[in-house]
Image (cartoon, grey):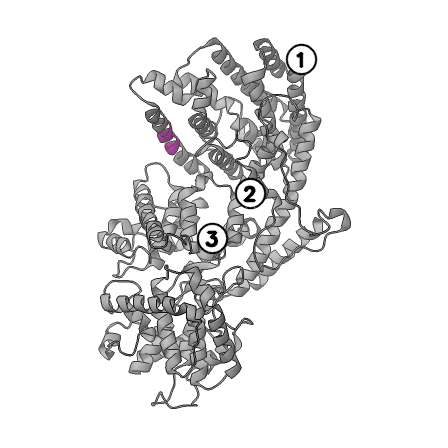
Amino acid sequence: MELLHVSIRALVKEIKEEMLDIDPCLFVSSSAYDTAWLAMINPAADSDRPHSSPMFKACLDWVLNNQTEEGYWGECDSHGNPTIESLPATLACVIALKKWNVGNKNTEKGLDFVHGNAEKLLGVNHDHFPRWFTIVFPGMIELARKAGLELAFPSQLNELLSDIFYQRQRILETEELVDGQYPPLLSYIEALPSSYDISGEDITMNLSGDGSLFQSPAATARAFMATGKEECLGYLESLVRRCANGVPPTYPRDEELIKLCVVNQLQRLGLADHFTHEIEANLAQLYRNYNSQGSQAKPRSNPVSAIQLHKDSLAFRLLRMHGYSVSPWQFFWFLKNQEVRARIEKDYEYFSSAMLNVYRATDFMFPGEYELEEARSFSRKVLEKVLFKGTRDNKDNFRSTNLEKMMEHELRHPWIARLDHLEHRTWIEEKNSNVLWVGKASFHRFSTLLTEKLMQLAVADYEFRQLIYRNELEEVKRWSRNRGLSDMGFGREKTTYCFFAIASSIPLPYDSDIRMIIAKGAIVVTVADDFYDMEGSLDELNSLTDAIGRWDASGLRGHSKTIFDALDDLVREIVAKVLQQQETDITIFLQQIWYETFASWLVEAKWSRGGFLPSIDEYLGTGMISIAAHTIILPASFLLNPSLIDCKVRPGEYETVTKLLMLIPRLLNDIQSYQKEQEEGKMNCVLLYLKENPGADIEDSTAYVREILDKKWGELLQHVLMDGFEDLPKPCKLLHLSCVKVFQMFFHSRNRFDSNTEMLQDIQKAIYVPLNVGTSKPLMPPQKEDETINSHSGRPPKYEISQIELASS
């Protein structure tokens, strides 16, 4: 394992030294399509004269030198596979080569790729081609044929190609050159048919101050060919000087946005802990930049830029996630502009990626931020509209685009109920995780080199964590068996569930003891809670509670003795570790917090068996303690850096963030367990609300509790992320948040914790099943014989979790 750790550290160092300390524009891939268009420019007055040298020979050289082994040009997805973008890009490149009568073998290889892969690539997107593709692909086919290139598509594609051409014709007939649609039709000037009437005045009127046509290198190249405008030439020359190794799909590039995207990518791949300094430095600079803008109005140009919406929502999410004080209005300015909102609703497919980022940003909503509630509602409606259109237009092959899959994932599985480790896996396995934002004729993507390095590191980090988690889980299971907790003969045996949830939710260093400490605490809580609920007599419960209060097992026997001894062993382990790290003895604190918890279970047992109905306030006063979230998290927080040692935390005297940690899981549990508890003659908050409000029904009661939950969740986020609310160290507050997310995962939509099978697939993916990343290069060095898990495959076998372990009595 040490060899693997060394390999990961070496790759992190390499990325920091060779990649993150360079021009951020180099993080974005060059556009083969746009570079090919610059390569086509003829400096001669007669642009049709053959065999002359191109104006930008470096662009032609780039085309010659950047064809893939498979024969295509253009960026691949994050798993190394060509995308639909490769078809028009490859045609543009072979057109450029044909124009200058060079690279005959490249041309032949490129055409072979188009002929051999068009059916596969077009079939994936059948009935759901993006607008840009229906404009650009037919245009490149026409130009290729005009250049004398022979295109021989399979006959089975004739109907599909005819449909694409028909869709283009509809666009040409219904859209104006510049009518508020973005990108406007004129920005595709290079791909429009020769029969389409575009005057020099149309071009001149729409040139930007920098001489570009909508900041598109390809469109500006074609505009220069048509008009010879010096402004266009100046833009193109500046572009080639700045971007010597292929030109980007948009120029100039927003360096600040690129840096934001890098930070976002590091976090979503699970690599943030390796680049803490770099992330904080970038966000600190971004925060200074936004503050310096003050209340300056955001661009309100018509058409509005989806890239600006993308940037602002991403900036808000990352800054708030890292504790910066930011105003929603500075980032969600579009809400106040009805014209902008109308444009988004009309061109919802083009703005879908930006709206997805807006929706994700609203995950970090604080209480009273009504503008964020409005942004969440607005963006959700846009996303649902996109998904509905996909369902309607493509019933048999819906979810054909990865963007739609991402939208559905966000809408169906809220961030508050998702575990970080599994989210990292989802993003690593996502083929389009290297996409930055939607461009005119392609996606802006991370460069191939950066994508490969980060993906290599992400795969290594994830599978190294899996190895660590497998070993730790086996140790936790041994502890549970040795302490007698695995075969109590009653209740729920959730050893694997507990460890999986903790390991998957809390971003801790590889060698942290905290995962196992929390998992052991959760196991004791589960067994002891079930003992008080269903197994122990009142005499046994009184005796055990008294023993915990004295911290003396004298007189205990059977299950009571087993529970006490396991707890005593856990407390001794925590005390020893804290004493070693902090030179402080926390024995009294641990004994008191566990006694408080056991005493709350005893109160609830007496209520249940005596038929007593407490008020909601009485119930929550006890229930917030009996859910035992704080009992698990606070002891482990003494092992964090910085620790709780200096915070003077005392049982019964908790900071607000800890009280929220205690309340939210209790209410979540109550919403999903009220039916079961009603059958067993127990009370919870949902049922007590019905008792205190005779005119209400169960829907009213659950709605009342959910309303409280939503408010308290916002308060928790605010207390965790922002400074100035309490004295707890930031790592401790983040541990609070991770714990609440675990309860959200277990109880958000149903009771997954009590199910014997609900979590099995997630457990497999988190701990046992290798990543599915196609062609990504492995980092792991060969295992030594004594480290080999499966000598045949080098991969851990699929682990079948024992149904005996998961069974509930």
Q: Is residue 319 shown above or below 417?
A: below
Q: Is residue 554 shown above or below 123?
A: above
Q: Amino acid at mark 3?
A: Asn
Classify mark 3: helix, strand or loop.
helix
Classify mark 2: helix, strand or loop.
loop
**Magenta segment boundaries in residue numbering:** 705-711
Measure the alpha-carbon separation of dots 3 and 1. 54 Å
* Residue annotated with mark 2: 507
**Mark toward the start of the polypeptide (3 vs 1):** 3
Residue at 56% in and 18% down: 598
For this rendering, which residue is in front, 416 or 571?
A: 416
Measure the alpha-carbon separation of dots 2 and 1. 39 Å
For this rendering, which residue is in front, 384 or 187?
A: 384
Q: Is residue 260 shown above or below 634?
A: below
Mark 2 near mark 1, Cβ–Cβ under 8 Å? no
Mark 3 near mark 1, Cβ–Cβ under 8 Å? no
Does residue 388 appear left or right of residue 795 in this picture? left
Label 3 neighbour load within 10 Å: few <14, some 14-19, many 20+: some
